[in-house]
Image (cartoon, coloured by chain):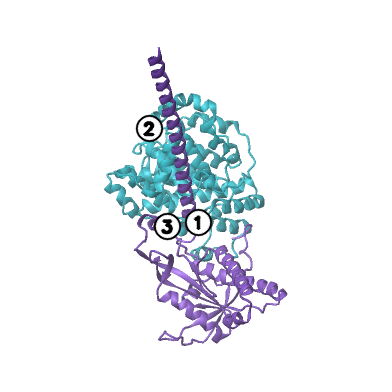
Chain colours: A purple, B cyan
């Protein structure tokens, strides 16, 4: 009587024990699956976010190969903007205020650039390097860059009104735009990688931006940009000027505005 | 958060219009009348195309139905079309694929951990849909290397083009997704799933027979689906040869062209701009030919295409030119907000025609770019 009772009790206890263990491991497995799913979705979200800054193919390549090694020659329009006299101003401003002023400037300029289908490749100090036609093929990249520059000028004017109310001196930006072939790709080391373009044409945009001071103009474009621009952009030809690192004088045109006239405005904003 | 729900999607802004003939056409052809069809009914050709261009109606003889479903899923995923993504997932669930397997498929497609012909086909679908880098005949080479015959390549290109068409129409119209997202979880569907799957598979098996139109006529078996070389974009459809897919696409392009809602010049401009954005030389030449027929000279056409604006354009055309450019690469919610604005400005019927034309241009120009000679 006792032995069968002990046997059945032990078997029952063991069954209960293993059933409990089974339930616990199932719960554990479910938790692991949920975490794995969450991690996969988080990665997907990160990938989607990163895709805003680099071509999706390149994002996938980076994820698959850790670092893409291939480059791609592309015709791009490069816009380089820099604040004039900001170094002097930054020495006079409180650091917190300086960061706030600069971040406000970057936010407004970035919005103007992205609205015109450009993308900010990087901030270099108080400078902005923006690209048009680098992420997606864009046959209208020169017009987009010129519209972006005019929108940036308007945004800066509005921002200066806000800054004046806070007693901050007005910001003044110079913008240079150049169009040409550059190598686009992911550059960097294991710790820091970025999608950008490199080449003489990228440096040219920065050199043209420097010439805004010499010419007393806010926005300068090169002949390659002018050739691709809508004739309704108002341009003023400037005398060619030598720039450091360039053998021949650079011919530039001051971009002063856009005469929309009839036919520009549709029923939806571009 | 499931990937499906992560896609930002606006509320549908189109008023449904009940059309019993459209419903019966859908039931006859597809076996079911999708509830969203009513949202497209104010533009008759667009609503009919929703039925006639459905992949099950294309009579694809060289693409297996399972591959067809995966291509539809991959393309909708690439275009972030929540509606098409939901319909593809619902279809796969009803056909018996467990949710877990579908999720794995979703995750595997981008990483391309698939092998052989399937991998080549899905990579091709993504490349043509994504169009960055621009699609070209070179994209078909890996398919041929994987053993796909010319006919299969053409059919796959057509399938991808049609999927990009559906994705765009659904996105621009912000088609409601709730029905399709909830469908696989409905008790009725869960209980009857094996029966539904049986009937769906049987319908698929029968689809390879040449189909008849509503009047009982067979689609003509002449070049480019029965059109002369002068028909709009016959050159892009010609590589599909004597197939039902060519005939279906031909019919939709013709109906879109003869629709009275928007002027033909606006239609040709839409195709010209999408063709330029996608780098399709053939489509650009054809669009210029059609523009010349509408009295727009080469210099004037060049000015519009170079600057996307001109004093020659009226406000509606100027809007369509802007919209056309936006339809190649876009964020769904952003373009849906613009679409709502345009619909309010020009009216639902004309907006639907504009959206349908832009979607059709994206399909035809992709097809033209990929299947252009030399093949």
Considering only vertical position in the picture, is B44 above or below B363? above
**Eyeballing the image, is A149 above or below B233?**
below
Residues B201 and A188: in front is A188
Instruction: Give residue A49's mark.
Output: 1
On screen, residue B311 above or below B74? below
Q: Chain of mark 3?
A: A
Q: Are marks 2 and 1 in contact (CB under 8 Å)?
A: no
Mark 2 or 1, closer to the camera: 1
User: Are the residues at dot 2 and dot 3 in contact (C-beta closer than 8 Å)?
Assistant: no
**x and y, in percent, of residue A105 in the image:** 60, 71
B94 vs B173, nearest the viewer: B94
Identify which residue is drawn at 36% across, 61% down.
Answer: A68
Tag 1's secondary structure?
Answer: helix
Q: Which mark is residue A59?
A: 3
B203 sits left or right of A145 in the view: left
Q: For the residues marked 2 and 1, what is the alpha-carbon distance in whole angstroms?
A: 42 Å
Q: Which residue is mark 2?
A: B208
Find the residue positioned furthest to the top: A1
Residue A226 as seen in the image, left or right of residue A66: right
Callout 3 crowding tier (Cα within 10 Å): few <14, some 14–19, many ≥20 = many
Location of residue B242 (image quadrant):
top left
Q: Which sits in the foreground, B54 or B45?
A: B54
State whether residue A261 appears in this view: yes
Secondary element type, mark 3: helix
Q: Are marks 3 and 1 on the same chain?
A: yes
Residue at the (55%, 58%) spot, across then down: B321
Residue B95 spot, x, y in % from top left? 43, 31
């Amino acid at each position: 009587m006792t032995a069968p009772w002990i046997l059945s009790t032990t078997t029952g206890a063991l069954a209960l024990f293993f059933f409990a263990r089974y339930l616990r491991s199932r719960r554990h497995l479910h938790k692991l699956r949920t975490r794995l799913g969450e991690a996969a979705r988080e990665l997907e979200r990160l990938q989607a976010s990163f895709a805003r800054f680099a071509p999706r193919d390149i994002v996938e390549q980076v994820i698959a190969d850790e670092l893409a090694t291939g480059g791609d020659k592309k015709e791009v329009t490069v816009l380089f903007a820099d604040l004039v006299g900001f170094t002097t101003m930054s020495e006079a401003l409180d650091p917190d205020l300086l960061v706030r002023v600069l971040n406000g400037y970057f936010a407004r300029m970035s919005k103007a650039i992205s609205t015109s289908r450009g993308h900010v490749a990087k901030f270099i100090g108080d400078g902005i390097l923006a690209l048009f036609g680098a992420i997606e093929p864009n046959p209208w990249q020169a017009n987009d860059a010129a519209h972006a520059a005019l929108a940036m000028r308007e945004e800066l004017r509005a921002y200066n009104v806000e800054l004046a109310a806070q007693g901050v001196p007005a910001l003044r930006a110079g913008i240079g735009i150049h169009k040409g072939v550059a190598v686009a790709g992911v550059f960097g080391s294991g710790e820091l990688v970025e999608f950008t373009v490199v080449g003489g044409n990228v440096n040219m945009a920065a050199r043209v931006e420097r010439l805004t001071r010499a010419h007393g103009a806010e926005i300068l474009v090169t002949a390659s940009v002018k050739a691709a621009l809508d004739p309704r952009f108002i341009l003023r030809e400037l005398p060619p000027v030598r720039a450091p690192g360039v053998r021949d004088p650079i011919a530039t045109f001051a971009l002063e505005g856009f005469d929309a006239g009839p036919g520009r405005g549709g029923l939806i904003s571009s | 958060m499931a990937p499906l729900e992560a896609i930002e999607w606006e509320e549908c802004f189109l008023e449904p219009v009940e059309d019993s003939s459209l419903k019966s056409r859908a039931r006859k052809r597809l076996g079911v009348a999708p509830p969203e069809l009513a949202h497209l009914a104010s533009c008759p050709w667009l609503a009919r195309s929703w039925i006639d261009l459905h992949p099950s109606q294309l009579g694809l003889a060289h693409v297996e139905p399972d591959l067809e479903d995966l291509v539809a899923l991959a393309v909708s995923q690439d275009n972030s079309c929540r509606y098409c993504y939901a319909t593809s997932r619902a279809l796969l669930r009803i056909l018996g694929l467990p949710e877990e397997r579908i999720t794995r498929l979703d995750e595997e497609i981008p990483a391309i951990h698939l092998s052989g012909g399937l991998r080549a086909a899905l990579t091709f679908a993504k490349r043509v849909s994504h169009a960055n880098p621009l699609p070209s005949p070179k994209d078909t080479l890996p398919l041929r290397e994987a053993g796909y015959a010319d006919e299969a390549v053409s059919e796959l290109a057509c399938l991808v083009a049609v999927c990009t068409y559906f994705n765009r129409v659904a996105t621009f119209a912000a088609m409601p997704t709730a029905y399709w997202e909830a469908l696989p979880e409905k008790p009725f569907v869960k209980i009857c799933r094996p029966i539904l799957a049986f009937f769906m598979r049987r319908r698929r098996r029968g689809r390879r027979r040449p189909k008849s139109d509503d009047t009982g006529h067979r689609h003509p078996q002449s070049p480019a689906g029965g059109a002369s070389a002068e028909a709009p974009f016959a050159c892009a459809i010609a590589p599909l040869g004597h197939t039902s897919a060519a005939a279906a696409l031909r019919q939709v392009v013709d109906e879109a062209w003869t629709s009275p809602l928007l002027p033909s010049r606006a239609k040709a401009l839409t195709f010209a701009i999408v063709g330029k954005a996608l780098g399709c030389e053939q489509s650009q030449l054809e669009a210029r030919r059609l523009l010349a027929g509408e009295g727009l000279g080469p210099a004037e056409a060049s000015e519009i295409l170079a600057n996307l604006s001109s004093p020659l354009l009226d406000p509606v055309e100027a809007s369509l030119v802007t919209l056309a450019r936006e339809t190649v690469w876009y964020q769904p919610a952003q373009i849906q907000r613009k679409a709502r604005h345009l619909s309010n400005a020009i009216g639902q019927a004309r907006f639907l025609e504009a959206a349908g034309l832009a979607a059709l241009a994206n399909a035809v120009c992709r097809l033209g770019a990929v299947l252009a000679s030399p093949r």
